[in-house]
Image (spheres, rainbow, N blue to C red):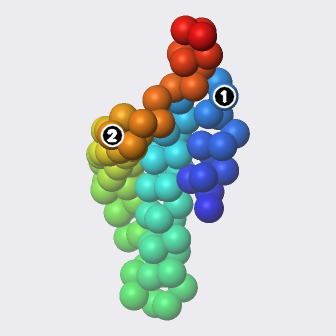
Amino acid sequence: VFAYFAYAATRKIHRVFAVALGGAIGSATNTVLVLGMAVLRGYLPLAMAGSIAVLHGITELIAGTIITVILVLGLQRIRGFEDTDSQARQA
């Protein structure tokens, strides 16, 4: 849900930026919720969850953003959802 809201709020500014931001927000949301639940359930101490978030969360955020941009833009191109602004300029 957070990823979609980030995408929807920025898609009129720049399509690739919106996709990248949605991927980054989605990845960060997943990391925070998974580690938060692990702390709440007593599986991890808070300090360990914080270090995992810093060490692995940043890498996951970068990788998730890159993979999201590649997949979404590729799927949009295959399905014919090209940038509507460039189509409007050509008409």
- How far is mark 1 from mark 2, CA to CA? 21 Å
Q: Which kind of residue does numbered mark 1 sit on? A: Lys
Q: How crowded is mark 1: few (under 14 residues within 10 Å), some or many (20 or more)?
A: few
Q: Nearer the viewer, residue 86 or 29?
A: 86
Give residue 72's quadrant in the image.
top left
Which residue in the rendered view is the most extreme toward the bottom? 41
Label placed on residue 12: 1
Q: What percent of the width, then of the height, locates residue 71?
A: 32, 45
Q: Which kind of residue does numbered mark 2 sit on? A: Ile
Write the residue at 55% across / 9% down.
90
Label placed on residue 78: 2
Give residue 10's quadrant in the image.
top right
Which residue in the rendered view is the most extreme toward the right? 9
Q: Quadrant of the C terminus?
A: top right
Q: What percent of the width, then of the height, locates residue 49?
A: 41, 69
Q: What percent of the width, then of the height, locates residue 6?
A: 63, 45
Q: Residues within 10 Å of mark 2 (few under 14, many from 20)?
A: few
Q: What percent of the width, then of the height, locates residue 29?
A: 53, 60
